[in-house]
Image (tube, rainbow, N blue to C red):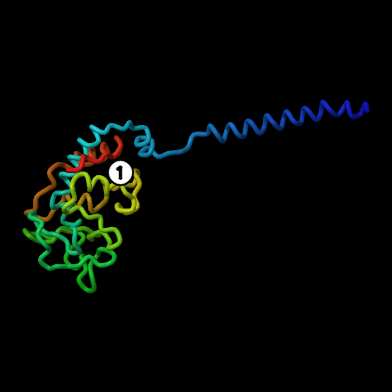
Amino acid sequence: MNMLKNKIPAVILVVLLCSVGIYAYTSQRVHKPIATSPVEKKVFSAKKDSVASVKAFEKVYAVLMSPRCMNCHPSGDIPLQGDDSHIHTMQPKRGVDGKGLYAMKCTNCHQPENTPGPHTPPGNPNWHLPPANMKMVFQDRTAHQLAKQLIDPKQNGNKDIKKLIEHADDGLVLAGWKPAEGLKLPPMSHAEFKKAWITWLETGAYAPQPN
């Protein structure tokens, strides 16, 4: 009986020490901050503002509907061409990967850099349309429709907010501000577009009201 009495305090001490250890481990796991990138921290800390978001998208929409963007986001499977966005005179087809069909590949004419001279093909190492399973159509989309489409991963190339922000600096996006000789630039600088794009996304990615 005396031996049992002597062991009871030791048992209680062991239980208490284990409890403290478990609590400390659990607290450390619960309160340990989740590592996020600078972009994610900025996005997730932003406040939603429908007025600022819609106003920013008005600028975004003006760029996306300009020929430099819309020509490669047609409603059909043939790209558009020129400042008047007419059907491409060579009538190349999209193909499964967006890079052309059969022997008529985009890169047959669109070289890594712009071809010198007026009315010659603009260039980029990765020139292509969106693929057949993710067409990302801009042509004939209202501002409301396009805003909804751009934030839908099933229609935007499986992009979340972070990837959408990064997409502002994609090579083909930047190519819009380096058109072939004689073609118009988008209606604002890339810096202004990028600022509007990020503002739209960070403040809630609100869509303008339907027309």
Where is residue 102? Give x, y as percent.
24, 73
Residue furthest out toward the right: 1
CA neighbours of label 1 inside 10 A, class few (<14), some (14 to 19), many (20+): many
Where is residue 185? Give x, y as percent.
12, 48
- The secondary structure type at the circle numbered 1 is helix
Image mark count: 1
- Give the left or right position of residue 129, taking residue 82 as reference: right
Which residue occupies the foreground of this view, 70 or 184? 70
Which residue occupies the foreground of this view, 190 or 138? 138
Residue 141 vs 59, above or below: the answer is: below
Residue 68 vs 97, above or below: the answer is: above
Residue at 78%, 28% (x, y): give it.
12
**Residue under pointer 1:** 165
Which residue occupies the foreground of this view, 128 or 78? 78
Residue at 18%, 47% (x, y): give it.
142
**Picture quadrant where residue 60 is located:** top left
Residue at 28%, 61% (x, y): give it.
131
Residue 152 vs 56, above or below: the answer is: below
Q: On the rendered image, what quadrant is the C terminus found in?
A: top left
**Picture quadrant where residue 74 is located:** bottom left
- Give the left or right position of residue 206, taking residue 36 as reference: left
- Give the left or right position of residue 150, taking residue 28 as reference: left
Residue furthest out toward the front: 211
Where is residue 104? Give x, y as percent.
20, 71
Q: On the rendered image, what quadrant is the N terminus found in?
A: top right
Where is residue 65? Give x, y as percent.
15, 49
Kind of residue at disc 1: Ile
